[in-house]
């Protein structure tokens, strides 16, 4: 039986992300240097290529610096590869319909790769935006090497900008990850037995992320006991406001610049052997990539058939709508349509200022980039209010366009992409969703049986609980997947009970 599409929380604003300023300021710095350089050279028409590399500065800010270096290098190379295909397509493929299809396939490849490598926000959408645009920028084959060189140089600058804070706070990401775990534990301590599965899942997720972040760190012996203390909140019991406040105070100290708190005041001599290895790729369901490719292609072709001048916007909209499950895709579609409509109003209001000169255009675009990062974690629709005009102003770098037709194209392409992207999610079913729940239940039962016997089994049990909850959320969000919630809830409850005994 089909499930109703969710409306709850569709437009609700979440608290701002704790480190939103890091990607915001990093991307602004990485964009400002090449933009101002191009401005001085009177070559702002090349800003698409420098932006493709500079926007890589949005990634990896929750990773420790060694892992961040590897991941950012991979993102930059993915940007260069995607732009290479896009520029070759623009130069060699005359048919707009074929270019739309190629853009959608590249978007699907970016989505699959980002999911497999667990890249995290902003995921594939930034790569998709720049590559889809590049498929429709006039291009000569002889120009491609120089343009790709600009992508690579700006990507290298983004890498340096994101790595630079490590010179001042080399263990900043580890401290923040541990602080998040302590804050999650404080919320559970404050709630007591009424905290519920959601608060316990949030704590388990935060602890797991912190343990992965600190595994190869020189400060693991300091932060490890703090994570053990956070984990002890899983034992439950009455609400303990005093204990919750103590956890929050430790988190504040960690986020500050002072010495590390905790029972140990020394750092270890070196990382655990093998702990810093990157996680193995976990290939997602092929349904996700197929949804992006199908939705993007059909959306772009529809935009072409309707005579719209920017069919790649429809491709990007469809790619952004295709999320982990249908329920989330529905929410993302509504949020994108609303955010873009409001964003067009912002674009119209700022256009006279931006057209006072090239300097004003660059500064407005940078300000919108910061505003987008400040708000997008609160709700996607609010971030889109600033992303939409920023994308339009980036197009103004090469040449000015009539405002009315430009806004109309953006609005229609957004609606077409959102509708057809959602239709692709409904039609292409994720058949792995139900099997993933079954495997997660089996793993949780096995972890529960060995929890008292094997070393490290407590962490395996916690990981199995997190995996089950994530699998259930994906399956529950698919309109067609029957989820045996009663049986799952029983197994999950037993797992939490056993874990509470182990940490008490």
Image (tube, grey):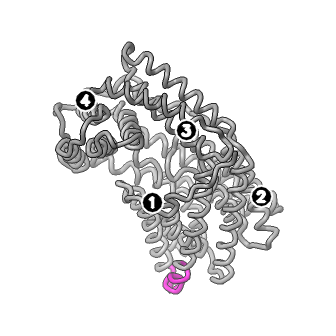
Report if residue 121 is visible in the image.
Answer: yes
Quarter the N terminus occupies: top right
Distance in Å between CA atoms under marks 3 and 1: 35 Å
Report the disc number at residue 27.
1
Tell whether 425 sits left or right of 243: right
The stretch in magenta equals 347-358
Tag 1 secondary structure: helix
In the image, residue 198 lies in the stretch drawn in magenta: no
Tag 2 secondary structure: helix
User: Which badge, 1 or 4, comes first in the chain's sequence?
Assistant: 1
User: Which badge, 2 or 1, comes first in the chain's sequence?
Assistant: 1
How packed mark 1 is, by other alpha carbons closer than 10 Å (few <14, some 14-19, many 20 or more), is many
Report the disc number at residue 472.
3
Tell whether 64 sits left or right of 242: right
Of badges 2 and 3, nearer the viewer stands 3
Report the disc number at residue 298.
2
Distance in Å between CA atoms under marks 4 and 2: 53 Å
User: Which badge, 4 or 2, comes first in the chain's sequence?
Assistant: 4
Of badges 1 and 4, nearer the viewer stands 4
Compared to 448, does 425 lie above or below? below
Residue drawn at the location 36% of the way across and 40% of the way down: 203
Of badges 4 and 3, nearer the viewer stands 3
Residue hosting label 4: 221
Compared to 422, does 489 lie above or below? above
Of badges 2 and 1, nearer the viewer stands 2
Report the disc number at residue 231.
none
User: Which badge, 2 or 3, comes first in the chain's sequence?
Assistant: 2
Looking at the image, which is closer to me, 56 or 232? Answer: 232
Distance in Å between CA atoms under marks 1 and 4: 33 Å
């Amino acid at each position: 039986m089909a499930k109703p599409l969710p409306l709850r929380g569709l437009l609700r604003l979440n608290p701002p992300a704790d480190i939103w300023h890091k990607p915001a300021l990093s991307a602004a710095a990485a964009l400002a240097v090449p933009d101002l350089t191009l401005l001085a050279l009177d070559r702002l028409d090349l800003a698409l290529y420098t932006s493709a590399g500079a926007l890589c500065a949005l990634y990896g800010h929750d990773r420790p610096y060694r892992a961040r270096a590897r991941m950012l290098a991979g993102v930059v190379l993915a940007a260069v590869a995607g732009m290479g295909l896009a520029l070759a397509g623009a130069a060699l493929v005359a048919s707009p319909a074929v270019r739309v299809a190629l853009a959608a396939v590249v978007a699907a490849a970016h989505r699959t790769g980002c999911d497999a490598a667990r890249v995290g926000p902003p995921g594939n959408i930034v790569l998709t935006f720049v590559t889809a645009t590049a498929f429709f920028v006039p291009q000569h084959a002889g120009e491609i090497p120089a343009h790709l060189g600009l992508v690579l140089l700006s990507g290298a600058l983004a890498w340096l900008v994101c790595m630079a804070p490590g010179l001042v706070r080399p263990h900043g990401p580890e401290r923040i990850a541990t602080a998040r775990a302590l804050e999650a534990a404080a919320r559970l301590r404050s709630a007591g037995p009424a905290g519920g599965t959601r608060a316990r899942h949030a704590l388990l997720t935060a602890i797991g992320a912190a343990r992965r972040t600190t595994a190869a760190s020189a400060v693991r012996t300091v932060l490890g006991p703090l994570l053990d203390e956070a984990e002890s909140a899983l034992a439950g019991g009455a609400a303990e406001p005093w204990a919750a406040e103590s956890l929050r105070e430790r988190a504040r100290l960690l986020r500050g610049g002072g010495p590390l708190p905790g029972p140990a005041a020394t750092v270890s001599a070196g990382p655990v052997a093998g702990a810093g290895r990157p996680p193995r790729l976990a290939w997602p369901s092929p349904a996700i990539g197929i949804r992006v490719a199908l939705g993007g292609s059909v959306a772009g072709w529809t935009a072409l058939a309707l005579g719209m001048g920017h069919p790649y916007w429809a491709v990007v909209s469809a790619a952004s709508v295709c999320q982990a499950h249908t329920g989330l895709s529905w929410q993302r579609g509504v949020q994108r349509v609303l955010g873009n409509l409001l964003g067009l109003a912002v674009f119209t209001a700022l256009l006279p200022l931006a057209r006072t000169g090239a300097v004003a255009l660059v500064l407005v675009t940078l300000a919108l980039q910061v505003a987008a990062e400040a708000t997008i974690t609160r709700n996607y629709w609010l971030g889109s209010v600033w992303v939409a005009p920023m994308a339009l102003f980036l197009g103004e770098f090469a040449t000015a366009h009539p405002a009315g037709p430009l806004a109309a194209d953006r609005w229609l392409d957004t609606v077409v992409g959102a509708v057809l992207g959602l239709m692709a999610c409904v039609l292409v079913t994720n058949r792995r969703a139900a099997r993933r729940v079954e495997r997660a239940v089996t793993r949780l039962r096995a972890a529960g049986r060995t929890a008292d016997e094997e070393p490290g089994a407590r962490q395996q049990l916690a990981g199995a609980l997190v995996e089950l909850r994530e699998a259930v959320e994906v399956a529950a969000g698919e309109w067609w997947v029957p989820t045996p919630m009663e049986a799952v809830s029983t197994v999950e409850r037993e797992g939490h009970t056993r874990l509470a005994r182990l940490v008490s």
